[in-house]
Amino acid sequence: STLSPSSAASDVYKRQGAWMTQIKICGLMRPADVVMVNQALPDAIGMVFAPGRRRRITMATARQLSQQLDPRIRRVGVFTTNQLSEILALVQQHIIQVVQLHATVDDPRIASLMAAHVPVIQAMTPANATQCQADYLLLDNARPGSGQVLGWNQLQSQRPVRPFILAGGLTPTNIVTAINKVYPAMVDVASGVETAGNKDREKINLMVQRAHQTCQHHY
């Protein structure tokens, strides 16, 4: 299954015997968004709980969305300064299965979550990637969710040795180029599948299709 807690070993990312690039659709906010992803079947979705973010939702909304979500799709919660107790409550109530944390390299919540056997994605810039302590490494620019494209050419020369998730300005137009340049195990998209701030069915379908059809051969 996607993002199992068994570390970031390369076999986690194999699917049906092929090296298929996985995809996470981030920033679900409405029941209509769930209908769209249930049709497209990405590997994971993200729900944002980080304070001050436009796509932030409440625990009640997240519970409703998670109950409507196809069980084959993994549920990731996105956090910044949230209290550890809030994060663990969402896991314990089965609202989310994986924690994505945008925090400092040595944030003590990472070790606490891993000790509780919660799979953790640590979001970092490429410059700090070697310091990742979590199960999974997500590479993004310094302003997550902004739609700003991460520098793929720079990443080609500084590519992590471990499998990683690529975020930052990905769209249906550039997704194939991005995968073929830096070979991520998974891609993560939010604004790239939106129109006027809301999730767009056609963009989601196209994004999932193109990611799944573009294999990453380099692990």
Image: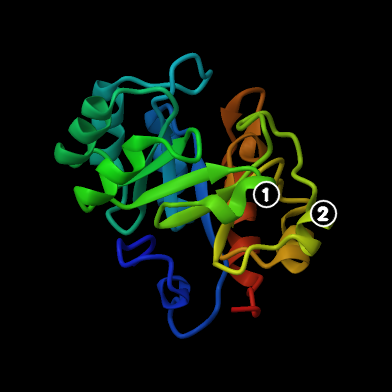
Q: Quadrant of the N terminus?
A: bottom left
Question: What x and y, as percent, mark residue 155?
Answer: 76, 56
Q: Residue furthest bottom?
A: 17
Closer to us: 184 or 200: 184
Task: Identify whether 85 is placed above or below 173.
Answer: above
Q: Secondary structure at mark 1?
A: helix
Q: Is residue 205 visible?
A: no
Disc 1, disc 2: CB below 8 Å? Answer: yes
Closer to us: 43 or 182: 182
Give left or right: position of 209 versus 101.
right
Circle 2 sits on which residue? 154
Label 2 Cα crowd, 10 Å radius (few <14 / some 14-19 / many 20+): few
What residue is at 38 percent from the left and 63 percent from the top? 2
Question: What x and y, as percent, mark residue 100?
Answer: 42, 41
Coloring scheme of the render? rainbow
Question: What x and y, as percent, mark residue 44?
Answer: 42, 52
Circle 1 sits on which residue? 126
Tag of residue 205: none
Q: Quadrant of the C terminus?
A: bottom right
Closer to us: 163 or 73: 163
